[in-house]
């Protein structure tokens, strides 16, 4: 099938490359000439493990192309995916749908024949109705169906998530065009259908809400275990054992029960805000999610005080080595990363910061001032008064701790991801602090 992706960002590029690998002919369209130029040269503008090889393979096979010419790509497509950004709107936290509406109008102007318009971007309930209205007003004679197909891609594991998903959700309009659209979507996802991946067809508004509900529930799990970690510290319990003990219950599950400095990234912060805004607008507040948003924001800010306390209550004039800046491993994404709260707070308290992240250094330079960016973890800890682990990259899990201790000015380690054992660190002579575990 002929597939066009409007937007060659994270979602559009990963989805486009995976659809091409399924055997479809895909064009990723973007208005950013720099991005298209990079992609045509074989350079990937984002970091995602395996994406460079997947793109290269499908470009070489002629199934994946990149263009700034939306007109031709839309006119030839059986399905056009809207995969543009929906950032939080300033002031009220609602999703900014400007790019979605612009894409809808552009699609309407250039579509030819029956076209399935698929909203891949994360959008509030009812957006599909608005997209349909925009297309109908722009092109009254258009033959089309607007479908919701939310993405559930985890940064760092996006290709596996696309090709081996827990489920695919498709929301279709309840009319004749919807039935035709369902057949197109089945064909697009045919390899998954043959592998018996659950494909859930729902009403369009239901599909839109599923995405927000899923992310909000995961944010609730993260925030819950973080609060349990605080309680563990007060009563002398171990949050990792609590997490394992409740996670073995199949009704709860093990995932997203790792205590840390709070969630960040491109999805959870903006999606929880958008869901609370939608709920309040409809007079049906989601009070649990309201609380989660507040608690998570406070937690990230509180992490700096943990560091200050571990360093004797005063960091003025001291140097702190920060390991990990991105919001999670295997990505260069800095959106709502805990480091964005922690580092400025430490600087405001008088500390000097040295930092290293395996992938997000270039992106980090846009967000921080007066930070010394280092060549590696050992460079970062040179002469520092403490080492703070914010992101749990694999390479930080097996540091030469004897070397770290010899390099630090004082053997203070604050581990906000619990990647080391307190007993082991004590034996090595470190003053070690972690989350929700006895020292």
Image (cartoon, rainbow, N blue to C red):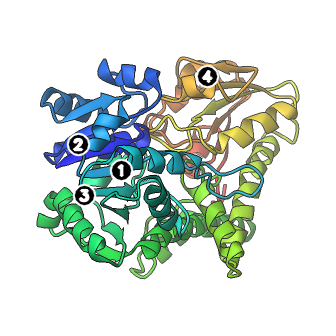
Number of the front mark, 1 or 4: 1
To which residue does mark 2 refer? 76
Residue pictured at 41% horizontal, 76% vertical = 248
Q: As displayed, is residue 104 above or below residue 165? A: above
Callout 4 secondary element: helix
Query: Observer-nearest residue: 47 or 305?
Result: 47
To which residue does mark 3 refer? 114
Dots 2 and 4: beta carbons under 8 Å?
no
Query: Observer-nearest residue: 309 or 344?
Result: 344
Q: Position of residue 109 (x, y in %)?
A: 40, 45
Dots 2 and 3: beta carbons under 8 Å?
no
Q: Residues within 10 Å of mark 2 (few under 14, many from 20)?
A: some
Q: Position of residue 223 (x, y in %)?
A: 63, 65
To which residue does mark 1 refer? 81
Q: Which mark is residue 380?
A: 4
Callout 1 secondary element: strand
Residue pictured at 71% horizontal, 27% vertical = 368
Number of the front mark, 1 or 2: 2
């Amino acid at each position: 099938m002929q597939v066009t992706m409007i937007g060659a960002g994270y979602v559009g590029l990963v989805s486009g490359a995976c659809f091409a690998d399924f055997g479809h002919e895909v064009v990723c369209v973007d208005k950013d000439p720099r991005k298209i130029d990079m992609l045509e040269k074989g350079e990937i503008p984002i970091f995602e493990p395996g994406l460079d090889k997947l793109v290269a393979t499908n470009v070489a096979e002629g199934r994946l192309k990149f263009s700034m010419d939306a007109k031709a790509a839309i006119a030839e497509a059986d399905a056009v995916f809207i995969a543009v950004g929906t950032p939080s709107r300033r002031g009220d936290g609602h999703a900014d749908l400007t790019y979605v509406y612009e894409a809808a109008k552009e699609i309407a102007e250039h579509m030819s024949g029956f076209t399935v318009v698929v909203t891949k971007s994360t959008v509030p309930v009812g957006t599909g109705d608005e997209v349909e209205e925009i297309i109908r007003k722009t092109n009254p004679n258009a033959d089309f169906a607007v479908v919701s197909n939310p993405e559930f891609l985890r940064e760092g594991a996006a290709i596996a998530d696309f090709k081996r998903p827990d489920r695919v959700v498709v929301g279709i309009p309840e009319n004749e065009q919807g039935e035709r659209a369902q057949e197109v979507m089945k064909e697009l996802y045919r390899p998954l259908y043959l592998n018996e991946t659950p494909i859930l067809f729902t009403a369009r508004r239901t599909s839109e809400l599923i995405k927000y509900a899923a992310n909000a529930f995961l944010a609730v799990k993260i925030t819950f275990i973080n609060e349990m970690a605080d309680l563990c510290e007060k009563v002398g319990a171990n949050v990792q054992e609590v997490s394992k003990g409740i996670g073995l219950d199949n009704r709860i599950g093990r995932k997203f029960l790792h205590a840390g400095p709070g969630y960040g990234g491109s999805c959870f912060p903006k999606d929880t805000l958008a869901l609370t805004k939608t709920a309040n607008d409809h007079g049906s507040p989601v009070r649990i999610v309201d609380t989660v948003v507040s608690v998570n924001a406070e937690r990230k800010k509180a992490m700096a005080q943990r560091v200050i306390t571990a360093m004797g209550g005063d960091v003025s004039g001291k140097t702190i080595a920060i390991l990990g800046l991105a919001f999670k491993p295997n990505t260069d994404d800095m959106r709502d990363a805990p480091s964005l709260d922690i580092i400025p707070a430490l600087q405001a308290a008088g500390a000097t910061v040295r930092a290293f992240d395996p992938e997000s250094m270039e992106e980090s330079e846009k967000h921080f001032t007066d930070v010394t960016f280092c060549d590696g973890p050992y460079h970062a800890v040179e002469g520092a008064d403490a080492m703070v682990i914010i992101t749990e990259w694999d390479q930080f899990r097996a540091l030469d701790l004897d070397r770290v201790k010899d390099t630090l000015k004082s053997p203070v380690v604050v581990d906000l991801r619990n990647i080391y054992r307190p007993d082991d660190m004590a034996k090595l002579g470190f003053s070690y602090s972690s989350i929700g575990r006895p020292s």
